[in-house]
Amino acid sequence: MSYVRDGIVLGVGTGSTVNHFIDALPDEKARLDAVVSSSEQSTRRLRSLGIEVSELSDVPTVDLYVDGADEATKHRHLIKGGGGALTGEKILAGAARRFVCIIDETKLVGHLGQFPLPVEVIPMARSFVSKQMIKAGGQPIWREDFVTDYGNHVLDVHNLVISNPVEMEQRFNQIPGVVTVGIFANRPADVLLVASARECRTLS
């Protein structure tokens, strides 16, 4: 909570790591000007704790965005979207003045791609985008029985070699039918907090 300041607009991510952060927020809510959320799941959790959730369009800026990641490198490039909230997460990360990402040490990797890359797609484009992922060397698997907050599907792409995350993020985002991809490299985390049983390291 050391990054939480009086009078800020706080953005909250989605997932098991962020749930611990959300559960500690009631003690801090009087300090916050507003809270915005990356997903319906996090919104429900925040409201259940008595924390009002604002729409992004109703706040002037997002001062701090706190989220987790499925993978991260020392360059603070991330793979996110294991929980399926990647579009909302990417919007808040892009809107935030400062993005703090919290992971445990097992998620710090030498290069991205061991965790399957989530790609959110418009349902009509699922087959087409899958073929493009195969051409890129990946193995796309449709996350069946799952629909995002925006009514879209998710492809989890295995076995990708992500040697240049910035370039791959840009290239995949240009494929017709792709809403967004789970690579966070063009807008990486500003601060990466890496927790272990012994300590919490800061990479920035």
Image (cartoon, rainbow, N blue to C red):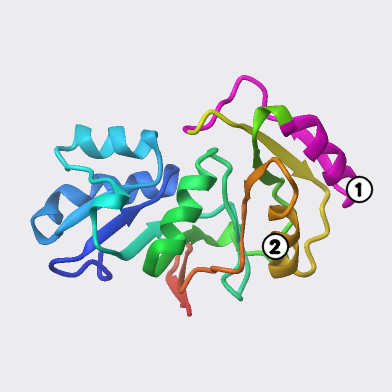
Left or right, 167 with respect to 196, comes to right
Q: Based on the displayed image, in which of its 4 quarters is residue 106 positioned?
A: bottom right
The image position of residue 127, as x and y in percent, is 80, 30
The image position of residue 115, as x and y in percent, is 70, 49
The image position of residue 184, as x and y in percent, is 59, 61
On the image, numbered disc 1 is attached to which residue?
A: 135
**Amino acid found under the numbered disc labelled 2:** Gln
Q: Based on the displayed image, in which of its 4 quarters is residue 82 positioned?
A: top right
**Amino acid found under the numbered disc labelled 1:** Lys
**Between residues 131 and 164, which one lies in front from this camera angle?**
131
In terms of sequence position, does the residue under pointer 2 or pointer 1 come before the other? Answer: 1
Residue 110 visible to an observer of this rendering:
no
Quarter holding the N terminus is bottom left
Mark 2 and mark 1: Cα distance apart in space = 16 Å
**Between residues 50 and 121, which one lies in front from this camera angle?**
121
The image position of residue 191, as x and y in percent, is 44, 73
- The secondary structure type at the circle numbered 2 is helix
Residue 44 visible to an observer of this rendering:
yes
Numbered circles on residues, count: 2
On the image, numbered disc 2 is attached to which residue?
A: 170
